[in-house]
Amino acid sequence: MKRAVIVGAGIAGLATALRLAQDGWHPLVVERSPTRRSSGYLVNLLGAGYDAAERLGLVPALSAHALGPFTTVLVRADGRPKLTVPAAVAEAALGPRTMTVFRGDLETALYEAVRDQVEIRFGTTVSTIDATADRVRISLSDGTTYDADLLVGADGVHSTTRATILGPDHRVDLPYVVAAFPLAHPVPDVPESSATTFIGPGRTAAIVNLGPGRSSAFFTYRCADPARELARGPVDAIRATFGDLAGGVPEAIGHLQTDPAGAYFDRVSQVDSPRWSTGRAVVLGDAAWCVTLFAGHGAGLALAGADQLGAALRRHGDDIPSALAGWETGLRPEVTRRQALARRGMYQYAPPSRLHVWMNDLTIRAVTLPGIRGLVRRGIERQNR
């Protein structure tokens, strides 16, 4: 039985552990955090991401938490509606093989699927890595040493595994900050089964109301010094940037104030590494290619990357370096395309001027026209083949 050490118990790490366990491997997952973590933003699974979820056996569990299509209302700063995108528009554009869930629900589905098959050690990190052509010896912070056939770094955009196995950091920090967090109950001024979205120069605020335990808030904005914003903390930073807005935003900030630690609050970064593996060590998911939330396919790419890695390892048998090289060759073009889409997406989430806001509004209005919907859907289908 081949042995693997997987660093990180997020979506990428748990999906890799599940796929390898299904193929007869013996994975060990180590996670720095002392407990499982969750976050409140939405993830879309479509194309290769949905296919991977299906092959991994996750669709039945996820279906119980699927949020389904919902109406999006673009609003002005005072909360007044500007234009409405009916739920049917998104449903028609995305097609039947798609699913929207909270990130936390996806992580829970993965954890429930893998916890009885794989050892997971929380509060544990990798201390040293000694790699040869035949094996990888990993020393862990709990004092144990583990000999493995494969090391997988799935420890996110700030990956220490990436820096250790691939040299200097390849993270590219962008001048944006993002915050996302769950809402215990819906906030006023946001209609049921809908999301209100304010998009202004340099910033976006979105609040989703899908009922108790199924609502969330998302904020992103451009700033000159993301590190300074992070030092302020999510409550002060978000209040200072969005405190002038109405339409449920003050109530959402009030929710954030009660549990700031439950928010995902970070700078926006991509990872641009010329390679994802060396010998028997590889990075995967955000640790390898972070496309940012602006691309909207991070979770799907993590699932697809894990599933395709398993397939490559099965094809190549004991030749693990060749499996890793072939896996990267097959996946990198899609990652490169998604990263490029994310850079263009910055103009959607943080338009540089009022003119750009106006142009975005025109595009959204056009998408709601019946004749344009079919074109949008066919374009999405081509993107996800």
Image (cartoon, rainbow, N blue to C red):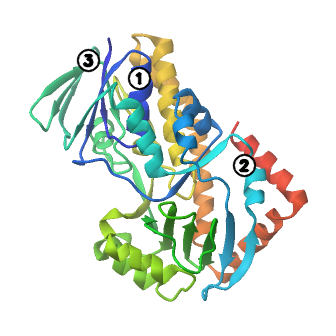
Q: Residue at x 80, y 70 (%)?
A: 365
Quarter of the image with the N terminus in it: top left
Q: Is residue 125 above or below residue 257?
A: above
The reply to whether dot 1 and dot 2 touch (C-beta < 8 Å) is no
Please state which amino acid type lies under the numbered disc 2. Leu
Residue 313 shows in this picture: yes
The reply, left or right, for residue 104 in relation to residue 304 is left
Residue that label 1 marks? 20
- Alpha carbons under labels 1 and 3: distance apart: 17 Å
Quarter of the image with the C terminus in it: top right
- Residue 135: mark: 3
Please tell me how crowded label 1 is: few (under 14), some (14-19), or many (20+) other residues with Cα within 10 Å: many
Please state which amino acid type lies under the numbered disc 3. Arg
- Alpha carbons under labels 2 and 3: distance apart: 44 Å
The reply to whether dot 1 and dot 3 touch (C-beta < 8 Å) is no
Q: Residue at x 51, y 13 (%)?
A: 315
Q: Is residue 342 above or below residue 55?
A: below
Could you say where residue 202 lies in the image, as x and y percent from the top left?
55, 77
Please state which amino acid type lies under the numbered disc 1. Leu
- Residue 94: mark: 2
